[in-house]
Amino acid sequence: MDLGIAGRTAIVCASSRGLGKACAHALAQAGVNVVLNGRDEAKLDAAVKEIASDTDVDITPVAADVSTSEGQQTLLAAAPQPDILVNNNGGPPRKDYSELDREAMVNGVVMNMVTPIELVQAVIGPMVKRKFGRIVNITSASVKHPLTGLDLSSGARAGLTAFLAGVARQVAADNVTINNILPGAFDTDRLRSGLQGAANAQGVPIEKIVEQRMANIPSGRFGHPDEFGNACAFLCSTHASYITGQNLLIDGGDFDGAF
Ligand SMILES: NC(=O)c1ccc[n+]([C@@H]2O[C@H](COP(=O)([O-])OP(=O)(O)OC[C@H]3O[C@@H](n4cnc5c(N)ncnc54)[C@H](OP(=O)(O)O)[C@@H]3O)[C@@H](O)[C@H]2O)c1
């Protein structure tokens, strides 16, 4: 399917690895020029090479911390008026809610709520004027389905979801859409490090934890980042202009509900 977005420009935050990289790759395969981002320059360079190997779009790496104002300014300098913004970031470390102090809570809210809202504020005006804009926020299945130790992440992302639900309706008539994709278990570095942590805590091999987790997912496996990236690219396509303010859960059926 031709997604109708070749020649457009996207900022994809936190995209040197994992789900962000998969979104950037799928957009690049659709002909979109992409700004890639991550803090580690070597990993960022590796991502640029990987995406350049099967696309011929412009790829601009920006090594910066997206949670900071300076990092956001550097990203926006690379593409001052992007047609597409994919908001992504690391998540707060897993921690019991009773142990979170004020500083940790503020940091979590800045990472997963304030930062994406600030970037939306920075890019949405020109999108409205040009009558084209696509904003996708990578949130988490934990917005719908609480996960122990990830309460801060879930709360901040739920706040983002509620905030942008209103904004989405304000810009829908200008062909600017805002949607969220909620990943379940996707096979990325982040998932693997969590599985390794669980294996260490239980004193069992990681393979055993992987087997247990997969057995609890109706699809019987983890998601592949490419599956996530392709869904993101579709939401950024011309075909998706009537889809806005939505939460797309991609979890292999893990969330056990009819709605
Ligand atoms: N994978 C899953 O199963 C899953 C499930 C639910 C939710 N999520 C959420 O989805 C998001 C992506 O997860 P993932 O699995 O793709 O993670 P990942 O494999 O750990 O990749 C994270 C990416 O974000 C970059 N990054 C992290 N903090 C950054 C910062 N402050 N500024 C700029 N770049 C930053 C990392 O690069 P550097 O480290 O070099 O900066 C890396 O490129 C996270 O918020 C995660 O909590 C993932």
Image: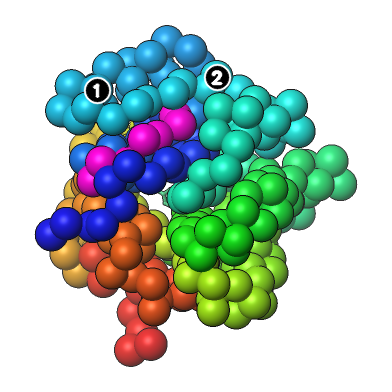
Pointer 2 local density, CA inside 10 Å: few below 14, some 14–19, many at least 20: many
What residue sits right under mark 2 in the picture?
63
Closer to us: 27 or 38: 27
Whole-percent x, y for residue 225 in the image: 27, 45
Magenta-drawn stretch contains 35: yes
Q: Amino acid at mark 2?
A: Ala
Residue 37 screen position, x and y as percent: 49, 28
Q: Is residue 39 visible?
A: no
Q: Are marks 1 and 2 in contact (CB under 8 Å)?
A: no
Q: Is residue 200 left or right of residue 68?
A: left
The boundaries of the magenta stretch are: 30-36
Residue 178 part of the magenta segment: no
Q: Height in image: 195 above or below 61?
A: below
Q: Residue at x 76, y 42 (%)?
A: 107
Question: For mark 1, what is the residue?
Answer: 52
Residue toward you, 247 or 30: 30
**Quick check: 9 above or below 183?**
above
